[in-house]
Image (tube, grey):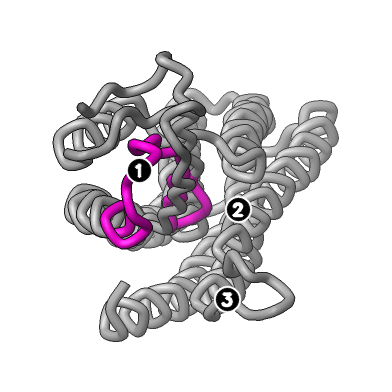
Amino acid sequence: MSINTERRTLVIAGASLGVGLLVLGLKFLAWWTTGSIALYSDALESIVNVVTAVVALIAVRLAQKPADAALPYGYHKAEYFSAVVVGVMIIVAAIMIAREAWSGFWAPELPDAPLQGIMISAVATVINVVWAGVLIRHGRKVRSPALEADGKHLLTDVISTIGVLIGLALVLLTGWAVLDPILAALVAVNILWSGWAVICESVGGLMDVAVPPLTQKSIREVIAGNAEGAIEAHDIRTRQAGKMTFIDFHLVVPGAMSVDAAHTICDRVEAKLREVVKDVQITIHVEPEDKAKHAGIVVL
C-alpha cells in the first residue's frame, strides 16, 4: 500500500468518527423531539457507530505499523480484532434496545411530533447511506476489514432506521402506540444478526483463513507457468491477514542444480506472483528431487 493510500485510509477512518458524532446528535434530537422508543433504540445504535469508528481508527493506524522484532509478520491482524470488538458492541446495543422495547411494550405511548422526528432521522439516514458506501468501497479496495466492517454496520443501521421510519408513519396513521416498542424489538433482532455476522467473518481472519478459491487457482497457475527448470511445487499454503496475503510452498529442483540457479527460479516465480497478488509475502523452501511428493504442481 502506498503512503498516499495509507494516509487516505487514515483520513477516512478519522472522518468516520466525525460522521458518527453528527449522526448520533441528529438521532438523539429526533428521539428528544418525539419520545419514541423506536427512535431511541435507533439512537442507541448510533452510539455503537461512534465507538466502532474509534476502534476502526485505532486498528487502521496500528495495522499500518511496519513489522518489528516483537511482531515479525506485521500488525495486520489488528483490524480483525477491531472487527470482533465492533461485532460485540453491536450485540450489546441490541440487548440495550431489546430492554427498552420490553419496557415500552407494557406501557406504550404515542410519540410527540412524529413528523419532525421522521424528518430529522431521515437526514441522518441519508448521511449514513453515503458514508457507508465510502467505507465499504475503500475498505474493499485496500482490504481493510475494520473499515469494511464499519461500513457494513452503517448499512445495517440504515436498514433499521428505514424500518423505524416506516413504522412511525404507521403509528401516525393508525394511532397504535404498541407499534413503537414492536419496531424497537425488530431493530434489536436485526442488529443482533448483523453483530453475529461481523464476528463470524472476523474470526475467520484470526484463524488464518486461506485466500479465495479463484485467487488460489491464479497462484497455482503462476507457479506452474513460471518455475521452468524446477520439478514440482507442493505443500502450497496461503493465508490472509488484513490487506496482506501470505504464500508459502516447497519447490523441488534437480539435485545437481546450483543454489544460484534455484534462486533465479524463485525470484522469477516471486516476481510473477507479486503481479497477480498485491501486498503479498512469499516464502519458498527449495528441496532436492528426492524430496518430490509427486502430488503437487508439476513444473518440468
Element marked by disc 2 = helix
Residue type beneath disc 2: Tyr
Question: Going from the N terminus, do you reach mark 3 or mark 1 first?
Answer: 3
Q: CA distance from mark 2 to mark 3?
A: 17 Å
Q: Is residue 257 above or below residue 228?
A: below
The residue that appears at 67% across and 48% down in the rendered structure is: 84
Instruction: Give how far across and how far down residue 3 sits, in percent.
Output: 31, 85
- Within 10 Å of the Cα at label 1, are there few (<14), some (14-19), or many (20+) other Cα atoms? few
**Decide: marks 1, 2 in contact (CB < 8 A)?**
no
Residue 262 in the magenta stretch? The answer is yes
**Decide: marks 2, 3 in contact (CB < 8 A)?**
no
As drawn, the residue found furthest toward the top would be: 295
Instruction: Give how far across and how far down residue 219 sits, in percent.
Output: 28, 36
Q: Which mark is residue 127?
A: none
The residue that appears at 61% across and 28% down in the rendered structure is: 193
Residue ID for mark 3: 67
Element marked by disc 3 = loop
Instruction: Give how far across and how far down residue 224 sits, in percent.
Output: 21, 31
The residue that appears at 66% across and 38% down in the rendered structure is: 207
The residue that appears at 44% across and 71% down in the rendered structure is: 16
* Quadrant of the drawing holding the N terminus: bottom left
Instruction: Give how far across and how far down residue 242 sits, in percent.
Output: 49, 55
As drawn, the residue found furthest toward the front would be: 256
Q: Which residues make up the magenta segment?
A: 240-263
Residue ID for mark 1: 256
Residue ID for mark 2: 80
Q: CA distance from mark 3 to mark 1?
A: 36 Å
Q: Nearer the viewer, residue 90 or 86?
A: 86
